[in-house]
Image (cartoon, helix red, strand yellow):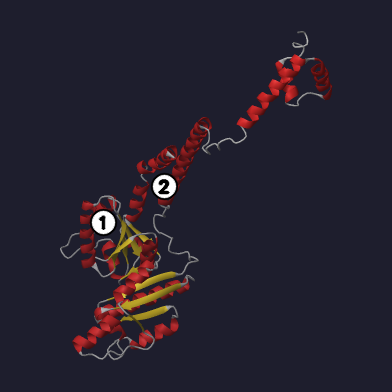
Amino acid sequence: MRKFFLLCLITVLPFGFIPINASHAAAANKVIYHVNLGNEQATDALRNIKNHLAVDPTVKIVVVTHSNGVNFLLEGAEDKNGNPYSVPVAELSAKGVEFRVCKITLERMKIDPKKALPEAKLVPSGVVEVTKLQQEGYAYLKP
Amino acid sequence: MNQEKKFSDEHLNAFVDDQLTPEEKEQVYVCLSQDEVLKRHVCKLRQVRDLVNLAYKELPQPSHRPLPAVRNKRFGRNLAAGLVLVISATAGWLLYQSAANTPSATAPEMLTQGAAPTEEIAKVLIHVSDGQTAHLKTVLDEVESLMRFYRDSHQKARVEVVTNSDGLNLLLADKSPYAQRIHQMQSEYKDLTFVACQNTIDRFQRDLGVTVKLLPGVVITDSGVAQIMRRHHQGWAYLQV
């Protein structure tokens, strides 16, 4: 009986040292920032993201934009103080933040996709992208 | 004297145990009939045999524990087998995890994962809590765009527009700025549902003295936020537009 329990203990012990939980934690630590209202919301989002990364550098962040939320990701876009959005977008992109732009919106607003900042990636539909990322385990945040 | 030594004790015990061939047995019988000493000796041997049989007739039952020596051998082998199982299962699990977490290659310009329809039904809950007219228009624009996208990409989908708080204005029969549009969307998209929160209805009646009458085809839920949680647990996606 004692030997049986010893065998069980030896079998179970390795699981304590293997970082299986780490991979689960990483899978859960990702979030969508949904931006669709305009530049004010975009400015809030960029600030939120900067703070988020300061507290948790490992979080995976994807910014999904559609409708008026795409404006800050276009060439030459500036906030209300005249500061170009390209600077914080480049900084955050260097830290692993992704920016995605809705193709339907660009077509509807007749914006040339080439006018989007280089960090921005096109997706077929911003709303569908939000739902798909949630199916992949992303949390949802609306700044 | 010679005859006493003719047969060894071993041979005589075999005779007593009936383990000799018939020829050998006959030999012994012949000698026995002629030799008293031999006869007495054989008799003694039979006695010993009988005493042994009597002593071992009712043995105490042995305990059912396996022999320690055999157990030790098996234990080492079992331990080794167990460790091999654990190590290979763990290695397999870790490989699976790393494969699952590898990001798929994305084209530099266009992420295409949204394009291909899946077998599963897409389930989306859109939460409306802001009642300003401009916002309500945005909601309907986005919902229509979404339903059209799913239809064009042949993706089965269920979309639920859950209204609570001031978002209820969207669905009030007398106050909604978009009654006609909603009616048209309901007939065009069978998998689109507009939902009103009962708690909000009660609050409108209690605090604002409004008698709530909803647009036709609107479904009522007990609590908008509870419905959001229910759908979340059922794997629905959530967003506000």
Q: Considering the numbered disc 2 on the image, is that residue within a helix, a strand or a loop?
A: helix
Chain for disc number 2: B
Residue A61: quadrant of the picture: bottom left
Chain for disc number 1: A
How many numbered callouts? Answer: 2
The foreground one among A88 and A97 is A97
At a point 77% along the width and 15% down the height, the residue shown is B36
Report if residue A84 is visible in the image.
no
Q: Residue B47 carries which label?
A: none
Report if residue B182 is visible in the image.
yes
Please state if B16 lies on the left or on the right of B111 as rendered.
Answer: right
Q: Name the residue under label 2.
A: B98
Residue B58 point in image, percent of width and height: 60, 36
The foreground one among A9 and B217 is A9
Please state if B141 lies on the left or on the right of B64 as rendered.
Answer: left
Mark 1 vs 2: CB contact within 8 A: no
Q: Name the residue under label 1.
A: A89
